[in-house]
Image (tube, helix red, strand yellow):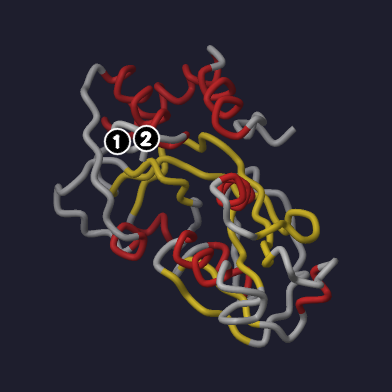
Amino acid sequence: MNASNELDGFDVDVAKAIGKHLGVKVEFITPGWDIITAGNWAGRWDMHAGSMTPTKKRAEIFDFPAVYYYTPAAVAVHKDSKAKTLADLDGKVVGATSTSTFEAYAKKDLTLDADGAPPFEYKLNPKEVHSYENSTTAFDDLRLGDGVRLDAVVSSLPSILDAEKAGYPIKQVGDPVFYEPLAIAIERGDPELSAKIADAVKAMKEDGTLSKLSEKWYGQDYSKTN
């Protein structure tokens, strides 16, 4: 939320830019991640611009008109943690957002079968994986202290860096564990809307809009893998 108590951020700006290309005003609602990924939106919203990874399983209920950026996933620990490498977290308690790719990675059950997804290796061997509604609630437990409730959190690197900037006593450990393509999602069955969104994102890539928005919010261009 910004100073005007409005939703703000990269995904929000991307959604607004898509709306501009489509000639419509964008309105935002914020259901929980598990509700979004369950499908059956029943007209409550038309498009999800919130960093969903396209997978074959999700494609059974969603269409993914376009990938709009690639984000590194990383591991955060409390600033007082003695962990220097991911191997130092073997046998520890790790948190992640429920039903997310981060949780799947922590549980060694991650499938990245979308086009352009780079290969990855499992470098984390936790004793337990605790599920959270979102990354913020996971970071809230991690901030309580090293090992108090969690030893680490798997999340997107931008989310970890944002939490650090917000004053959370956390830090990244090790290199990113995987890179995931993230896409706009709509429910299956609307090829016209899918095509319009695909055209909008294509235009935003070509005119540099996505690169500029990524640089604005993350300080790096995540709209491409290299």
Q: What residue type is labelled 2?
A: Asn
Q: What residue type is labelled 1?
A: Glu
Q: In the current view of this chain or complex, which residue is farthest to the left?
A: 43
Q: Which quadrant of the rendered structure holds the N terminus?
A: top left
Against 202, is 82 above or below?
Answer: below
Pick the residue in front: 198 or 173.
173
Which element type, helix, strand or loop, lies under badge 2?
A: loop
Contact check, label 2 and label 1, Cβ < 8 Å: yes
> Residue 120's x, y, as percent?
74, 59
Residue 2, numbered label: 2
Which residue is found at the position 73% from the left and 86% from the top? 91
Q: Name the residue under label 1.
A: 6
> Residue 34's x, y, as percent?
34, 65
Which element type, helix, strand or loop, lies under badge 1?
A: loop
Answer with the quarter of the image where residue 76 lies.
bottom right
Marks 2/1: CA–CA distance: 5 Å
Against 56, is 43 above or below?
Answer: above
Pick the residue in front: 226 or 32.
32
Answer with the quarter of the image where residue 219 lies.
top right
Q: Is residue 6 left or right of residue 92?
A: left
Residue 184, numbered label: none
> Residue 10's x, y, as percent?
47, 34
Dot 1: within a 10 Å radius of its alpha carbon, few (fewer than 14), some, or many (20 or more) residues? few
Pick the residue in front: 213 or 62.
213
Q: Is residue 118 left or right of residue 110?
A: right
Against 196, is 152 above or below?
Answer: below
Which residue is found at the position 47% from the left and 46% from the top? 51
Q: Which quadrant of the rendered structure holds the C terminus?
A: top right
Which residue is found at the position 37% from the left and 45% from the top? 185
